[in-house]
Each structure stands twice: as structure tokens, then as C-alpha cells.
Image: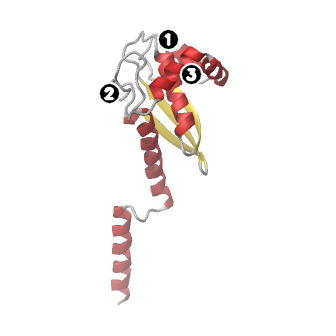
Amino acid sequence: MERVSGLLSWTLSRVLWLSGLFERGAARQPRIMEEKALEVYDLIRTIRDPEKPNTLEELEVVTESCVEVQERNEDDYLVIIRFTPTVPHCSLATLIGLCLRVKLQRCLPFKHKLEIYISEGTHSTEEDINKQINDKERVAAAMENPNLREIVEQCVLEPD
């Protein structure tokens, strides 16, 4: 009887684990990070390209694999985005990075630190652009420019 009870208990916990209803601490962590990364991706994939009528997802500037989420503390996350401009000399890469930052700062429902980078080797001035889009003062100054702010607003506007 004891053996049957143990087997039943093991089977039940295995079924719950496989169905995702019961997870042990360490096993739960990667799943939560994947869910958060998908949540981030769902927000940024609809951002419009500043020059074209396409979204960043359609142009493959952002993909699911370009989003990484790490837990910093309980309920505090590090969100890392690595986007790929359409061409190595893209003049609007900084603006795309700004759009990503603005959209996520406005819409992410959890506490986070945000780091946005151009994918390594995909732009001729990636170091300079990475510094610009991760500098709070430069971002704030850019958003004070009414023309630039209007372009960003049009890019991050949710489609109907």
C-alpha cells in the first residue's frame, strides 16, 4: 500500500509538473523569464519603422530571440534588447533605439532596468549609438525636441 501511495504521489506531481501547474523553484525561473521576454517582445514588435510603413517585426529589426530578461531582485528585472538595423549604415538606428526605450518605459507592467543595444557587428557606428540610447540625459534631451517627439509618437502608436 505504501508503495502504491508513493507511486501515485510521484505520478501526480509529474503530471502537474509536465502540465506547468506545479513547478519547483529553479525550474520555474527560466519559464518566468521566457514569459517576461515574450511580454516585452509583444510590446516592441508593433513599433513602426520611421521610414517605411512596416513594423520592426516585419523588417526583422526585432525578433523574439533579441529580447532577454534577467531577474535582478524579487519583482525587479533587467530587460536587454539587441536589435538589428536593416542596413549597416542605417541613419535611423538611434531613432529606432529611442522608440524601443520610450515604448517599454511607458508600457512595461513590471519594475525593470532597460538596456538597448544594436546587435554586435550589424552597424558601422554601433558603439556610439549604444551609448546614446542608454544615456538617460541624452534620451530626455531628444524627447524635448518636438519634431523628434512627434516621430517617436507616430512610431510607437498602437495599430488599430
Relative depth, front residue between 103 and 127: 103
Q: Is residue 74 left or right of residue 42?
A: right
Please tell me whether mark 2 sits on a helix, a strand or a loop: loop
> Label 1 to label 2, Cα distance in Å?
24 Å
Q: Is residue 59 above or below residue 16?
A: above
Type of amino acid under label 2: Glu
* Residue positioned 37% across, 84% down in the render: 5
Q: Viewer-nearest of labels 1 and 3?
A: 3
Amino acid type at image mark 1: Thr
Point out the frontmost of discs 3 and 2. Answer: 2
Which numbered disc covers residue 58? 2
N-term-proximal mark, 1 vs 2: 2
Q: Which residue lies under the disc numbered 1?
A: 125
| Foreground pick, 82 / 99 | 99
Residue 154 shown left or right of residue 145 in the figure: left
What secondary structure is marked by label 1? loop
Query: Horizontal and vertical percent for residue 117?
Result: 50, 24
Q: Nearer the viewer, residue 66 or 97?
A: 97
Q: CA distance from mark 3 to mark 2?
A: 22 Å
Residue picked out by circle 3: 133
Quarter holding residue 115: top right
Q: Residues within 10 Å of mark 1 (few under 14, many from 20)?
A: some
